[in-house]
Image (cartoon, helix red, strand yellow):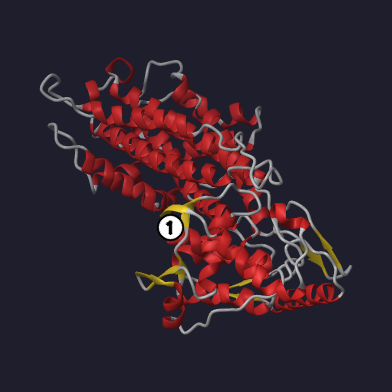
Amino acid sequence: MTLKIEGHGLTIDQLAIVAREGVKVELTPIAKERIEASAALVQRLVAKDVAIYGVTTGIGEFARIRVSPEQGAELQRRIIYSHAAGVGDPFPIETVRGAMLLRANTLSRGNSGVRLKTVQILLDMLNKGVTPVVAEKGSLGVSGDLSPMSQLAVVALGEGEAFYKGKRMPGGKALELAGLKPIDLTYKEGLGLINGSQMCVSGSALLLVDSRKLLKNAFIASAMTIDALKGVQSAYDARLHAVRPFNGQNVVAAHLRTLMKDSAVINSGSAKVQDGYSMRCTPQVQGPIVDAWRYVRSQVEIEMNSSCDNPLFFTEDEAHLAGGNFHSENMALAIDFLAIAMSEIADLSERHTNRLMNPVLSGLPDFLVEGKGLNSGLMVAQYTAAALVSENKVLAHPASVDSISVSADQEDHVAMTPIAVRKCGEILRNVGHVLAIEMMSAAQAFDFRLPLEPGQGTRIAYKLIRGVVPHLEDDRVLYPDIEKIGNLVRSGEIVAAVEAVVGELGFERA
């Protein structure tokens, strides 16, 4: 399989298969035409001695200073050198690969004024497995991810460091081993390689892929809890939700009905009239998170397919325009929103676990184990969930509300998007563990309902979990159990097994 790109229509799922699975990428013929036409326009404008930001002038506060055409190529190289100033641990290889794809996709729109060979080196590195070493910290989320993208671009010049075939080495050596040659630069190409939010957007796209998987796991975990606690089913009736026609709410209610269908546990009867909010209102809590996810995806996919550097060139008008398309406020707000929404997934999940633990609420043994006093059961597993939920509350504080002026106040409002992305990634890791603890607890609760069988979907998840983690008869070390179920959650194995029986747990109303 080869993915063809031309600056339009790229999706988060396509990015994920390139970033994580190594799918090859190539430009379409129309993309090549646009790129070449844009580069030719830059050459014509330079020949006319037109003042163009970052091409025949300095950058940032130095935009007031003209640069001669003879100095143009050197300016572009020095732009990359001076901006490669990040610190911290390297980004994951998949994030850098996604950024390389995104930068090539942006350049293929033909508004950036770079040559075809400059776009092609990004795709050649991507296709041959040369991944620049890029430090995680140093970008403000405006003027693009300047530090990260510069550390990426410097490898294309034969410098910096790269990962190749599992080894970290000098960038020039990695290119040589891959059979590639470093590129030289001409007008606009330093800026063309680094001016944009591609590192943040790559991370955001991968967060969306991962959070979708977690959301589906959350539907299953919630259904397991409600099923095990003999939840009152009127709360999920289609008629009740149809009169409040939010997409996500109706989607979640439908999935819960499907997952719990034919449950002998529920059908065994209960004297309850209604359940506590964390059970009864699961569609009203998880539903808005589904809709938040859909909104964030729309924002990320727009940015993935946009021209977002500066200046931009318009061949049909022989024009160049300086502006601020590099500013990633839209991404910062969107990912802050996703972080808040996904924190709520864990918040609800921990409350479900609490109800399973409390014999007054569950009608089951204290902390889901016999021999109370001698055994503590799953008591402290809930502590772990509570700790992670509390941590998420801190991490969910929006990064986008902060700004620090830089570049002698020329760049006096910044988005802090990279911090939003990094925090959201940590939140998702916590959510995965919290859901694993809920599923472990619900499986233990089902054990006490035997021989009654759970619903058609919850039954699949229960049996899969019991295939890797046995019933807790007497206290044992719990962290391996949590990790084993966490692996099932993160890998999507539980979701895949359940969807194979009940159909896709999609995010849009049928």
Q: Is residue 100 visible?
A: yes
Q: Quadrant of residue 81?
A: bottom right
Residue lying at the far bottom of the rendered structure: 179
Image height of 424 relative to 135, above or below: above
Q: Is residue 456 visible?
A: no
* Residue drawn 41% across the image and 82% down it: 177
Instruction: Tell me residue 313's x, y (percent).
Output: 79, 66
- Of residues 442 and 338, which is closer to you in this image? 338
- Of residues 433 and 92, which is closer to you in this image? 92
Q: Amino acid at mark 1?
A: Pro
According to the picture, the residue beneath numbered tag 1 turns out to be 92
Lateral position of residue 464 relative to residue 401, left or right: left
Q: Quadrant of residue 153?
A: bottom right
Residue lying at the far left of the rendered structure: 374
- Of residues 9 and 178, which is closer to you in this image? 178
* Residue drawn 44% across the image and 25% down it: 279
Instruction: Tell me residue 498's x, y (percent).
Output: 40, 48
- Judged from the image, the secondary structure of the residue bearing numbered disc 1 is loop
Image height of 358 relative to 199, above or below: above
Instruction: Tell me residue 467's x, y (percent).
Output: 24, 48
* Residue drawn 84% across the image and 70% down it: 315
Lateral position of residue 230 relative to residue 188, left or right: left
